[in-house]
Image (spheres, rainbow, N blue to C red):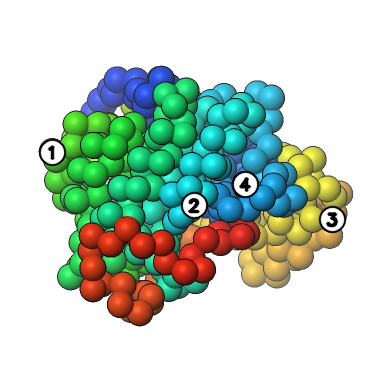
Amino acid sequence: MAPLTVVPPASGTTTAPPLRIGSMTLDSPVVLAPMAGITNPAFRQICREYGGGLYVCEMITSRALVERNERTMRMIRFAPSESPRSLQLYGVDPPVVADAVRMLVAEDRADHVDLNFGCPVPKVTRKGGGAALPYRRGLLRDILRAAVRAADGRIPVTMKMRIGIDSSHTTFIDAGRIAAGEGIAAIALHGRTAAQMYGGQADWSAIETLKSTVDIPVLGNGDIWEASDALRMVAETGCDGVVIGRGCLGRPWLFADLAAAFAGRPARHLPGLAEVSAVMRRHASLLIEVMGADRGIRDFRKHVGWYLKGFGVGGPVRAALSTVDSLIELEDRLGSLPDQPYPTQILGTPRGRGTGTRHVVLPEGWLSDPQSRAVPFGAELDASGG
């Protein structure tokens, strides 16, 4: 991998102790958030090469796993060098979730399972899943209890959630207490409601509140664009670690910044265009290894805009790079670009797609009984990845 330019920090340093999640100890208290279509083995590998932490695969649905869906079984493959192996499960039916966890443990397919209660997309919430589910406290408890018992102490089980459905229906405090009581090893809280999707500003005060409520590790998520944001989140909320989602899109070297910052060496990596081009070529190569030549290069196209954000390469060049048909064509086009310094004006700015506040679509009568243990009809998805 090409060397990266390092500049000294502009402010003071801090350190963070290793993060313990059950039997796992992470030198860097940083977790890569599972992102559909993004956190496949290729992206996990390229991020992992920049720093320690926990790198989570794309969301896997419990039913698809139990039924050994062919695509799902491919998605849970980890490279031999991946350790620990982290997998996120989506599920709404306690026995099915238990079967999925039991399968992962019995077949030694993961070292850690995270349960998804944070997905805000309509196709999930309208069935009572994802970020909608914690409102049903009874069902949430049943799912968590089933997963922890199925893991049988052999691997840690964690959960990721949001503040609630919307500002009038917050769930994170009750959900946190239930999780701690059922043996969940750690909780990641995205400081937004489902209604906010990925818009507005994350409410870090909710992370602080959760940390003061439960006696298990709490990880904060939301609006971490630079390592300095992660340090500030820890300082302001007291959280035990951070979860990185959109902030690393087109910037896998952010994990080097984070590892250094939490070790008390907050240097910032500012790769020039030649170095970024080298990372792009490697990322595309890894995708091709995982997916095959045609699908791999097509999958890489969506990363081009993120990698080139802020660089003065021009619209036609971006368009051409976003439609390449082969690794050779990608290398040729990247090789013709003159080097440029990193565009520091974009540091700290959001990445990925933002959204406005939306009405959360829920099953009929969903809000009528917060203690319900009923499994919503049709909520078990049969396709993994989100």
* Image quarter in which the N terminus is found: top right
Considering only order in the chain, which callout, 3 or 1, is on the residue closer to the N terminus? Answer: 1
Are discs 4 and 1 less than 8 Å apart at CB? no
Which residue was labeled with disc 4?
66
- Mark drawn on residue 291: none
Spatial separation of the CA atoms under disc 2 and disc 3: 29 Å
Considering only order in the chain, which callout, 3 or 2, is on the residue closer to the N terminus? Answer: 2
Residue 369's x, y, as percent? 23, 68
Residue 189's x, y, as percent? 30, 48
- Give the quarter of the image for residue 264: top left
Query: Which residue is painted at 55% across and 42% down in the image?
Result: 100
Local SS, label 2? strand
Mark 3 nearby-residue class (10 Å; few <14, some 14–19, many ≥20): few
Spatial separation of the CA atoms under disc 4 and disc 2: 12 Å
Which residue was labeled with disc 3?
294
Which residue was labeled with disc 2?
90
Query: Which residue is painted at 52% across and 38% down in the image?
Result: 101
Q: Nearer the viewer, mark 2 or mark 3?
A: 2
Q: Amino acid at mark 2?
A: Tyr
Considering only order in the chain, which callout, 3 or 4, is on the residue closer to the N terminus? Answer: 4
Spatial separation of the CA atoms under disc 2 and disc 1: 27 Å
Q: Amino acid at mark 4?
A: Val
Which residue was labeled with disc 1?
212
Residue 63's x, y, as percent? 58, 53
Considering only order in the chain, which callout, 1 or 2, is on the residue closer to the N terminus? Answer: 2
Q: Nearer the viewer, mark 4 or mark 3?
A: 4
Mark 1 nearby-residue class (10 Å; few <14, some 14–19, many ≥20): some
